[in-house]
Image: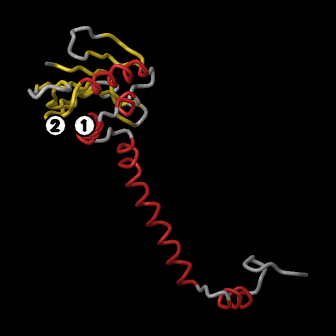
Amino acid sequence: MRLQVGTSGAPREYTVATAHRRGFDERNWMNARRAVLALLCIFALCAPRMAAAQGRPAPLEGFVASIARMWAAGDANGVAALAPGDDRMVLDLGNGGAEATEARHVAAALRELFRDRATLAVRPTQVNIAGGQPVRGFGELSWTSRPRGVTDSESSTVYIGAVWENNAWRIRELRVLR
């Protein structure tokens, strides 16, 4: 008859001798059980916080600051790439005609705007979370520019309407207020 290690039919000396040879004794088993129990308790306490943090939007300030950098660099494609999932933004470049536009048309309109104007300074001035579901917010940029070939500068406010979508901020609305 062949006995299995650790079974009730195995002699105690055989089981303990095998365990000692492998570096385990009853105290190590108890410590291992306590460690596993402690890890389970920590996980149970932290899991709700981690789950809640995953649904929380990233700070809108960083998003608006990144748009300010793209605006200062004249990166029309970068700004247009921040369109929401439906690929449409409400766009008004200061002519009073605001309409929902596809991202590729937004990029083309911004390229023309940046081609016609020299940017002197861009800085974020205001950021607010409006709330709602999905979460919405807005930011404003102060944009100092001048028409190319002209020395007089003009100041404008760039309004950015943002929506939290697919774990990222997206531009829903973009308006240049002169």
State which quarter of the image contains the N terminus. Answer: bottom right
The quarter of the image holding the C terminus is: top left
User: Is label 1 in a helix, a strand or a loop?
Assistant: helix
- Most extreme residue toward the left, as rendered? 152
Q: Nearer the viewer, residue 75 or 165?
A: 75
- Crowd class of label 2 (few under 14; some 14 to 19; many from 20; radius 10 Å): some
The image quadrant of residue 125 is top left
Q: Are marks 2 and 1 in contact (CB under 8 Å)?
A: yes
Q: Name the residue under label 1.
A: 72
Q: Which of 105/20 is in front? A: 105
Q: Which image quadrant for residue 159? A: top left
Rate crowding at label 1 as few (under 14), some (14 to 19) or many (20 or more) other CA atoms within 10 Å.
Answer: some
* Mark 2: amino acid: Ala
Q: Name the residue under label 2.
A: 121
Q: How is the image coloured?
A: secondary structure
Q: What residue type is labelled 1?
A: Ala
The quarter of the displayed image where residue 21 is located? bottom right
Residue occupying the point 50% across, 68% down: 36
Q: Where is residue 67 in the image (x, y as percent from the top left)?
A: 28, 35
Q: Which of marks 2 and 1 is nearer the N terminus?
A: 1
Residue 32: where, in percent of width, then height?
52, 75
Q: Vertical placement of 80 versus 96: above or below?
A: below
In the picture shown, does residue 59 fall above or below 41?
above
Q: Measured from the top left, where is residue 114 in percent x and y?
A: 28, 27
Of 89 and 164, the residue lying toward us: 89
- Residue at horizontal 33%, vertical 39%? 56
Residue in the image at 59% along x and 86% along y: 25
- SS state under label 2: strand
- On the image, the x and y values in percent for residue 171 come to 33, 27
Query: From the viewer's perspective, is residue 46 above or below residue 6?
Result: above
Q: Residue 27 carries which label?
A: none
